Image (tube, coloured by chain):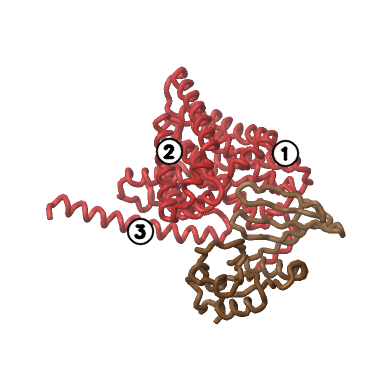
Amino acid sequence: MTLAAAAAESDAALAFIEIGAVALALAVLARLAARLGITAIPLYLVAGLAVGVGGVAPLDVSAEFISLAAEIGVLLLLLALGLEYSADDLRHGLRTGFRPAAVDAAANFLPGFGMGLLLGWSTTAAFLLGGVSWISSSGVVSKVLGDLDRFGNRETPAVLNLLVMEDLAMAVFLPVAAAFALGRGPGSTLTTVAVALAGVVFILNVALRWGGRLSTALAPASDESLLLAVFGLTLLVGGLAQQLEVSAAIGAFLVGLALSGPVQQRAGTLIGPLRDLFAAVFFLFFSFQIHPGDLVGALLPGAALAVLASAGKLASGWVAGGSVGAGRRARLRAGTVLIARGEFSIVIASLGAHLADGDDLTALAAAFVLVTAVVGPLAAKYADRPRPRHRQPA
Amino acid sequence: MPDVREIRLPGIGVRHEFTTTDGERVAVLVHRTGRRELLLYDRDDPDTCSTVLHMSPDDTRTLTELLGASQVTEAVTEVQQRIEGLAIEWMTIPPGSPVVGATIAEGQFRTRTGVSIVAVIRDDATIPAPGPDHEFRGGDVAVAVGTPAGLDQLRALLVA
C-alpha cells in the first residue's frame, strides 16, 4: 500500500467518525424538536454554530464535500416544494389570491429591506434580507395547521393559497436575487435578470405543457428507478438552469411542478427522506460559516425584525382571512400561523453569503429564523384558546 | 341530496362540505395520501371546526359500512330481482387459500363453475372487471356473479 493511499484511508475514517457523530447529534435534536412541537431548523442552526468556524468542536471534513451536499439539499427542498402543488393549485391560487399576496409581499418584504438599508448594507444585501423576512416556511405552516387540527377551518384554504403564491413569487425572486448577488455592473445585471426571468417563464411553460407526458413516462417505473430518475432530473435541470444563471433551485422547483398525478405522490414519498438528510446538511453548513460572536450581535436586530415581520404576517393573515369571509378570530389565527420563517429564508440568505455584508446578512437571517420558527408555532397555538375538542385514536 | 361544496387545500387535499337538514355543517377532508378526517363545525362560530375525527383507512371502511350498509343491501336485492336466477356474492379469500398467488386465468374459474368474478376489493380500493392476469392475495374480496350452484362451487375453490 502506498503512503498516499494509507493517508486517504485514515482521512476517510476520520470523516466517517465526524459525520457519524454530527448526524447522531442532529437525530437527537430532531427528536427534541418534535417533542417541543417546533421545527428542527433552529436547532440545526445552533448545532452548525457549535461545529463551525470558531465553534466549540470545529470539524475537519472538507468544506468542499459539505458544501456540495448542502447545495443538493437546497435543490431537494425546492423539488419537494414543487411536488406539493399541482398546476391546478397554481392556476387556482393565481385566480383568487392576488390581493392577499400583494399585501403579504409589501408588509413583509419592506421590513427586511428597510432594516438592511438602515444597517448601512448594500442594496443587494438589503434586497436579500427583504426576501428573508418575506417568505413564510410552508413546511412549518402546514405542519402547525395539521397539528392544531385547523384544516377544517374557514381561513385555512386562504392561508394555503397564500403559501402557493409566496412560492410562485419566490420562483421569480430567487433568480432576480441571484442575478443581483453576482455583483456586476447595472447594465450586465439587468441583462442577467432579463435572461433569468425569460428562463423561468420558459421552464414553467415546458413544465406545465410537457409535465403530463413526463409523468406518464415515469409512471411504470419501480420505486428505485423512479427515485433515481427524479433525483437525476432535478440535478440535471438544476445544473442547466445554473448554467443559464437562472438559479439551480428554481430548476428543481419546476421539475417538482412538472410531475403530476400518482407519480407526483410517489416521488414526494420517495424524495422525503433524501430531502431531510441533505437539507439538514444545508442548515448545518449555513450556520457553519457564522461566527458565534456575529450571531450574538445579530440577536437584537433579529428580534426587532421578527417583531416587524410578525406584524406584517398578521396583516397578511387579516387580508387573506377577510378574502374568504372569515371572522376576527379566524383572521387572527391566519396571521399568527404565518409568522414562522424557515427553510426559504435560509436559502435566500445563503445567496448573499459571499457579499461584503454577507457575514452580517447570514447572522441576522439565522437569528431571525431562530426567533420566528420558535415563536410562530407558539403564537399560532395560543391565538385560539380554548382549543377545539380533539379526538384521535390512541 | 344537499349541495356538497368542494374546497381545494393546496398541498393537503380536498375538503367536501355540506349542511345537514338540521343545519349542522359537516365536512370530510380527503388527504392526498387518501387518509380521511371527519369534521364537525361549531354552531356559534362557523369559521371554526369544533370536532375533528382522524380516521385510518380501516376506520373509514367501518364507518362507511355502518352508514351505507343498508343502501348496499337494497341495491343488491334489486339487482338480484332484476336478473332472475342470477346471484351475486362477496367472498373473502383467506391468507391460506390455495388460490393466493394464482391469477384468475390460472384458476379457470369461469370454465369450472360458470361464475364470473366481476370485481375484487383489495384494502379499500375496488378493482372493477379484473383482468385474467389479476393475482389473488390473502384478504382480497372477490365479487362474483352466477347461479347459486356455481357460486357454491366457486366458494369451495376460493375458500377451501
Q: CA distance from mark 2 to mark 3?
A: 28 Å
Q: Which residue is mark 3?
A: A20
Q: Is residue A310 left or right of residue A190?
A: right
Q: Earlier in the sequence, mark 2 or mark 3?
A: 3
Chain for disc number 1: A
Picture coordinates of residue A187, whole percent (x, y)? 46, 17
Tell me if mark 2 has few (under 14), some (14-19) or many (20+) residues whose alpha carbon lies within 10 angstroms of its own. many
Depth check: give the residue in front, A272 or A70: A272
Quarter of the image with the N terminus of chain A is bottom left
Q: Which chain is brown?
A: B
Residues behind callouts 3 and 1 on a single chain:
yes
Q: Which residue is mark 1?
A: A319
Say whether marks 2 and 3 touch (CB < 8 Å): no
Count of numbered badges drawn on the protein: 3
Q: Earlier in the sequence, mark 3 or mark 1?
A: 3
Quarter of the image with the C terminus of chain A is bottom right
Question: SS of the residue at dot 1?
Answer: helix
Q: Colour of chain A?
A: red
Q: Residue at x 51, y 50 (%)?
A: A263
Residues behind callouts 2 and 3 on a single chain:
yes
Quarter of the rendering containing residue A389: bottom right
Depth check: give the residue in front, A65 or B134: B134
